[in-house]
Image: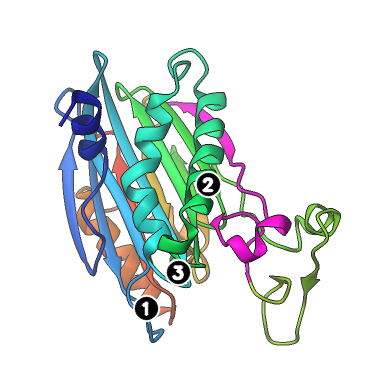
Amino acid sequence: MDRLCCFSSQLAGGRSSCGSGKGRSHQGPVKYGFSLVKGKANHPMEDFHVAKFVLYQGRELGLFAIFDGHLGDSVPAYLQKNLFANILKEEEFWTNPSTSISKAYERTDTAILSHSPDLGRGGSTAVTAILINGRKLWVANVGDSRAVLSHRGQAIQLTIDHEPNTERDSIEDRGGFVSNMPGDVARVNGQLAVSRAFGDKNLKTHLRSDPDVTNADIDAGNELLILASDGLWKVMSNQEAVDIAKKIKDPQKAAKQLVAEALNKESKDDISCIIVRFQG
């Protein structure tokens, strides 16, 4: 196996399932913890995650992601294995991270569609975070998994929820429509409850896969970052999540507590949560 393949394998996380774990930076005080619980729907767990620190070209990168699949687990599993590797393959990553992340998202989606007979007809949302040397944070997303930063105890949403009603014009310009049936959420063509996603070949002409990308400088005012699937955010506000997490120093215990709170609030979906704590 060549060096690039070896490094690509290091970037992938283990297969997500019900459980939790934690880790820490080797060069600073940053720690992370995660917790994942299968929802009550009658299908296998469709959430996957990445949470790890790696050394790359003389820098330490914290790589964190949640991939929330629908109609099967093949697409989120593919993203878990390939998306970060594709981002870091971009030659201009260090000089223009935003463009590199956007290009990698689009190229990864193209690869998924070209493998659609093997990966099936499903798709996945994604929220990714790259922490460079514990100081610079780059966050991107497609869909409704979300990243929330705590700054001096105040919740700051770093991502944009890509919902059909908010991107109706884009969907209709592509020849699709948004349904709003009583008792249900808005859906693209009556099917998908997000307006951007990886995969979903049958709907792709009406969907987007380009991410929203943002960045933040991590300083003494930033306590922690929460990444979570919509199984958490459907039942909990950003500030509620921050208020719970900031009281628990161990990020694994904090992630487990957020999942437990979501279950207490009767979330039915798969629930996945990663907490990155920047300070002790």
Horizontal side of residue 259 vs 19, given as left or right = right
Q: How far apart are labels 2 and 3 at the CA level? A: 23 Å
Q: Is residue 116 left or right of residue 203?
A: left
Q: Which residue is mark 3?
A: 231
Question: In the rendered structure, which segment of residues is drawn in magenta?
Answer: 192-218
Q: What is the quadrant of the C terminus in the image?
A: top left
The residue identified by callout 1 is 39
Which quadrant of the structure image shows residue 62?
top left
According to the picture, the residue beneath numbered tag 2 turns out to be 109
- Looking at the rendering, which quadrant does residue 229 occupy? bottom left
At a point 76% along the width and 55% down the height, the residue shown is 167
> Residues at badges 3 and 1 in contact (C-beta under 8 Å)?
yes
Q: Earlier in the sequence, mark 1 or mark 2?
A: 1
Horizontal and vertical percent for residue 238? 51, 55
Identified at 41% across, 84% down, the residue is 41
> Mark 2 or mark 3, which has the lower sequence index?
2
Q: Nearer the viewer, mark 2 or mark 3?
A: 2
Q: Amino acid at mark 1?
A: Gly
Label 2: which secondary element: helix
Residue 76, percent from left and from top: 40, 57
